[in-house]
C-alpha cells in the first residue's frame, strides 16, 4: 500500500486530504457497500464512487477488492496489538488485564459490522472462498494468535499447559453464543450486548 501524502483532486483547487482520513473513508465506503449490497456489488468502481475519490487514488491504497476487504478485517485486529504488549508477574493483575483484553476483543468481534461480515460469509456467493481466506487470516486466526502468544508469556498463571487451548476456550466461552444471538437478531450487537457477565464467568473459571 502506498504511503505518499494524499493529494486527492488537488489540481481542482481542493485542499489535500490527510492520508489516514482518506484510508478510513475508503474502508468505510467499502464496508458499507459490502454489508448493504453484497460482495459482487462491492467493485473498486463502486467503492470509488461511494467514497468520493478517484479510482487512481483508490488503487494507491488497495490492489483490488480482496486486498481492500482484507485491510478492513486486519484493521479490526490491529486495534488488539497494543493490548498485548503489557506483561505482569502479578496474578491478580494478570486476571485484570485478561478481562480488559477480552472486553476489547469482544466489542470488536461482536460489533454490527463484524457480525454483518460473519453473516455474509455464512452464505454462498461468487468470491466467497477468497474473502473467507482474508477473514480467517486477518481476523479470527490473528486475534487468536495474539491472545495465545500473550497467554504463553503468562503460562504460570494458567490451569492448563497449552496456551492455545486456553485461548480457544476463552474466546468460545465469551463470544460464540453472543455471536449466534446477534447474528439471528435475538440480541443487539456490541457495545449494547451485555458481554461483561460472560467475561467475568470465563475468567473466574480460569482461576479454579
Image (cartoon, grey):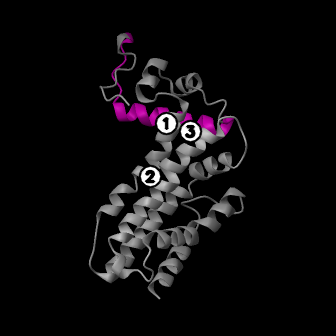
Q: Is residue 30 left or right of residue 184?
A: left
Disc 1: which residue: 27
Question: In this rendering, is residue 89 above or below 18?
Answer: below
Q: Is residue 94 above or below residue 19?
A: below
Image quarter where the N terminus lies is top left
**How far is mark 1 from mark 2, CA to CA?**
15 Å
- What secondary structure is marked by label 3? helix
In front: mark 1 or mark 2? 2
Q: Position of residue 83 (x, y in %)?
A: 35, 61
Q: Are marks 1 and 3 in contact (CB under 8 Å)?
A: yes
Residue 198, percent from left and from top: 56, 75
- Residue at disc 1, secondary structure: helix
Per the image, is 129 magenta? no
The reply, left or right, for residue 45 in relation to residue 142 is right
Name the outermost residue toward the bottom.
208
Of the pair 112 and 14, the residue shown nearer to us: 112
- Tell me the magenta residue range: 12-38
Instruction: Report the front residue among 134 and 18.
Output: 134
The magenta stretch spans residue 17: yes
Find residue 31 and name its label: 3
Q: Is residue 195 visible?
A: no
Residue named by callout 2:
77
Q: Count residues near mark 1 (Cα–Cα under 10 Å), then give few for <14, some for 14-19, many for 20+.
A: many
Residue sitting at x 59%, y 40%:
131
Is residue 12 at least partly visible in the picture? yes
Q: CA distance from mark 2 to mark 3?
A: 16 Å
Residue displayed at 61% across by 53% down: 115
Which circle's residue, 1 or 2, is located before the other in the chain? 1
Dot 2 falls on a residue whose secondary structure is: helix
In the displayed structure, 48 sits above or below 118; it is above
Q: CA distance from mark 1 to mark 3?
A: 6 Å
Q: Main secondary structure of the magenta part?
A: helix
Amino acid at each position: 500500500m502506498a504511503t505518499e501524502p494524499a493529494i486527492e483532486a488537488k489540481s481542482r483547487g481542493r485542499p489535500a486530504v490527510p492520508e489516514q482520513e482518506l484510508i478510513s473513508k475508503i474502508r468505510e465506503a467499502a464496508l458499507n457497500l459490502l454489508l448493504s449490497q453484497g460482495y459482487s456489488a462491492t467493485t473498486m468502481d463502486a467503492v470509488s464512487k461511494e467514497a468520493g475519490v478517484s479510482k487512481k487514488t483508490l488503487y494507491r491504497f488497495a490492489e483490488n477488492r480482496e486486498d481492500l476487504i482484507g485491510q478492513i478485517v486486519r484493521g479490526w485486529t490491529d486495534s488488539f496489538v497494543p493490548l498485548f504488549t503489557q506483561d505482569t508477574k502479578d496474578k491478580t493483575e494478570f486476571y485484570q488485564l485478561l478481562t480488559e483484553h477480552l472486553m476489547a476483543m469482544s466489542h470488536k468481534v461482536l460489533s454490527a459490522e463484524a457480525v454483518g461480515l460473519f453473516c455474509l460469509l455464512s452464505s454462498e456467493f461468487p468470491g466467497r472462498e477468497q474473502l473467507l481466506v482474508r477473514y480467517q487470516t486477518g481476523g479470527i486466526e490473528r486475534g487468536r494468535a495474539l491472545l495465545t502468544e500473550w497467554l504463553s508469556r503468562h503460562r504460570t498463571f494458567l490451569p492448563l499447559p497449552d496456551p492455545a487451548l486456553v485461548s480457544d476456550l476463552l474466546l468460545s466461552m465469551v463470544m460464540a453464543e453472543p455471536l449466534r444471538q446477534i447474528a439471528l437478531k435475538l440480541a443487539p450487537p456490541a457495545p449494547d450486548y451485555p458481554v461483561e457477565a460472560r467475561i467475568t464467568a470465563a475468567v473466574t473459571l480460569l482461576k479454579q
